[in-house]
Amino acid sequence: MATGDDHREVADGDGHGGNFESRPTPPETVPDEELDSTFQGAMYALQREREQATVVDTNGNEALIWLGQYDLHEYNERWDDPTAELYILVDQQFANSDPHWVMMVPAVTIDGNQPGQIPSRNTFTDPDGNHGDKVEMATEVADEDSAIAFSWRWSNMNRQPDSARDLANAHGLVEHLLRLGDSRGGA
């Protein structure tokens, strides 16, 4: 996972310095001036909901956004690992698009199943397989060996964006995905 030099010393209880606790930092970020100006406004809206959200890669009109590390057990205890980093891939021409890619790094399993075997979720884990470009993009940016790409259409949840500001909904939609409930419905 991406971690930087942002460390906080944790006392060991006897008044002496102790362990260091690392907080995740995003991979290298894309400068704002390289983004579409309307999309920059969309990112500001998202950052009001998820402060650390930042664009970490672009491919043509697509932007890969790092949402940060999530405590998976906060959403559902069935996740086999407690944390993962989450990314979304969206069009910079965001209004009226149909965003649907969420990537988890590393590929965290549930209930001891194989990566990608998650009920009610369309998932892809093979970088050489169907939609492998999404998996590969996330693993390269995060410098990890595995990832899961979720096809998680906003339109299936009646959240298709009407304006760039609707990018702020991304955090809530990702939280809904992590709860492992029904893949459709009110997120």
Image (spheres, rainbow, N blue to C red):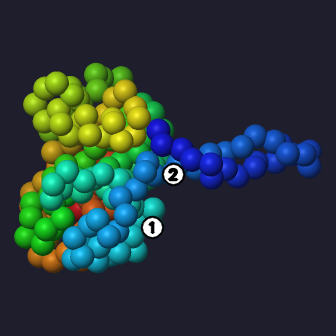
Which residue is label 2 attached to? 25
Comparing labels 2 and 1, the label whose residue is closer to the camera: 2
| Foreground residue among 181 and 145 | 145
- 165 left or right of 144 in image: left
Residue 41 shows in this picture? yes
Distance from the alpha carbon under mark 2 to that under mark 1: 12 Å
| Foreground residue among 6 and 85 | 6
SS category of the residue bearing label 1? loop
Give above or below for 20 relative to 80: below
Which residue is label 1 attached to? 51
Query: Where is residue 135, by image quadrant?
Result: top left
| Foreground residue among 93 and 180 | 93
- 82 left or right of 34 in image: right
Residue at 45% over, 33% down: 81
- 12 left or right of 87 in image: right
Residue type pointed to by label 2: Thr
Give above or below for 177 relative to 108: below
Residue at 54% over, 44% down: 3
Residue 18 spot, x, y in % from top left: 81, 42
Q: Residues within 10 Å of mark 1 (few under 14, many from 20)?
A: few
Q: If you read the primary sequence from the N terminus, does the residue marked by circle 2 or circle 1 appear first?
A: 2
Please state, as top left, top right, bottom left or bottom right, where the C terminus lies in the image. Answer: bottom left
